[in-house]
Image: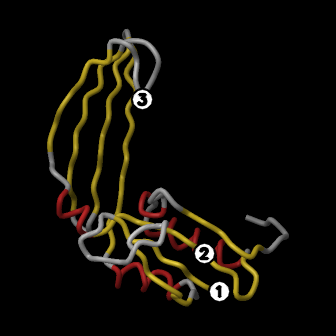
Amino acid sequence: MNLNKVYDFSTMIYCDYGALSTTDRQTVMKNIYHHLKPGGKLLLDVFSMAKYNSFQEKQTWELCRNGGFWREGEYAALYGCYKYLDNVTLEQISVIYDSEITNYYLWNTCFTKGALTKEANDAGFKVCEVYGDVAGCPYNESNFTIAILLEK
């Protein structure tokens, strides 16, 4: 990505960072680092190990007669929740509408504070602060999210 600009601040919130593969996370970190001014900051959040540990494998379904999150109009949704090694979860949603089926795959990597700090340091960032969420609540291992403020 060549924006030909540098910025003071960047965000990557809603735990989007953990939805990327390891390689894609490295690429994103490198690109953000490159496009920040010296002293520029990055705020990002991820799901924590508390989220991973509480994640329940299950299969459920629902009928949405008046539409819902996935689309307008009546549809059925089949949900599958699965845990994998390396702190990865998958929420698979199959939306059935008339004779059409659309599948969504929501992958997430959950992090320890140490693992997130290592990825940030490996990209060249210095950790300024670690929080429990992007609103700035204190970090606690029982929080479902970890937010980290980084500096170039």
Amino acid type for the residue under numbered disc 1: Lys
Question: Is mark 2 in CB contact (under 8 Å) with mark 3?
Answer: no
Amino acid type for the residue under numbered disc 3: Phe
Residue 15 position within the rendered picture, expressed as x and y whole percent measured from the top left: 44, 60
User: Could you say whether the residue bearing mark 1 is in a helix, strand or loop?
Assistant: loop
Q: Is residue 112 left or right of residue 30?
A: left
Which image quarter holds the N terminus? bottom right
Residue at (60%, 66%) from the top-left corner? 11
Pointer 2: what residue?
A: 42
Question: Is mark 2 in CB contact (under 8 Å) with mark 1?
Answer: yes
Q: CA distance from mark 2 to mark 3?
A: 30 Å
Pointer 1: what residue?
A: 152
Which quarter of the picture shows residue 73? top left
Amino acid type for the residue under numbered disc 2: Leu
Q: Residues within 10 Å of mark 1 (few under 14, many from 20)?
A: many
Q: Relative to residue 75, is residue 81 depicted above or below? A: below
On residue 69, which mark appears? Answer: 3
Tell me which label, 2 or 1, sits earlier in the chain.
2
Q: Is residue 1 left or right of residue 152?
A: right
